[in-house]
Image (tube, rainbow, N blue to C red):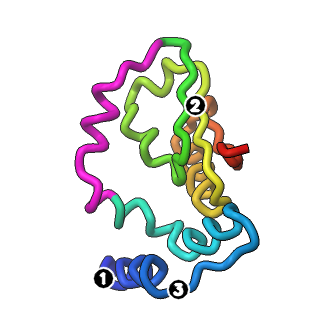
Amino acid sequence: MAFFSDMKILYHMLLKPVRGENHAERMESFYGGQANAYDDFRRRLLKGRENLFQQLPKPAGGIWVDMGGGTGSNIENLADDIAKLNKVYVVDLSESLLKVASDRFQARGWDNATAVAADATK
C-alpha cells in the first residue's frame, strides 16, 4: 500500500499542474491531493525532526507556534510537553493539511492545540 501512496505523492510533487490565482490557492492545489499521505512520505525523507523537537525548550504555560506546520505532525514530537503548554498553534495556508492537523489534535485529545489558516506574509 505504501508504494501506491508514494506514487500519488510523487505525482503531486512532480507532474500535477499547480493552479490558483493566489499563493493560498496554489498551495492547496499542490498539497490537497497528498494531504492524507503527506506525513508518512515526509517522515522517511526528513530525518532528525523528532530529535530536534525533543531538544527545543518548551516553557510550562508557554505558547507554541509552528509556522507552516501543515498536518501538525511536528507537534507530536513535543510528546508529554504538549500538556504543559498553554496553547499550541499550527499555522499554514493549506486547508487540506490543516484538516489533517485538526483531526490529529482531536484524536489525541489536545484541546490546547489549534490549526489556523493564515498567510504569514500579510
Q: Position of residue 85 (x, y in %)?
A: 53, 20
Pointers 3 and 1 in contact (CB under 8 A)? no
At x 57% / y 22%, what residue is drawn? 63
Q: Residues within 10 Å of mark 1 (few under 14, many from 20)?
A: few
Q: In this view, does 57 lie to the left or right of 25?
A: left
Q: Mark 3: which amino acid?
A: Lys
Q: Position of residue 107 (x, y in %)?
A: 55, 47
Q: How far apart are marks 3 and 1 (CA)?
A: 18 Å
Q: How crowded is mark 2: few (under 14 residues within 10 Å), some or many (20 or more)?
A: many
User: Would you say residue 83 sits in the magenta stretch?
Assistant: no
Q: Give the range drawn in magenta.
A: 43-59
At x 37% / y 38%, what residue is drawn? 77
In the image, which disc is placed on residue 36? Answer: none
- Dot placed on the residue nearer the N-terminal end, 2 or 1: 1
**Which secondary structure, mark 1?**
helix
At x 50% / y 23%, what residue is drawn? 83
In the image, which disc is placed on residue 16? Answer: 3
Name above or below for residue 51 compared with residue 32.
above
At x 60% / y 52%, what residue is drawn? 103
Q: How far apart are marks 2 and 1 (CA)?
A: 33 Å
- Dot placed on the residue nearer the N-terminal end, 3 or 2: 3
**Which secondary structure, mark 2?**
strand
Residue that badge 1 annotates: 3
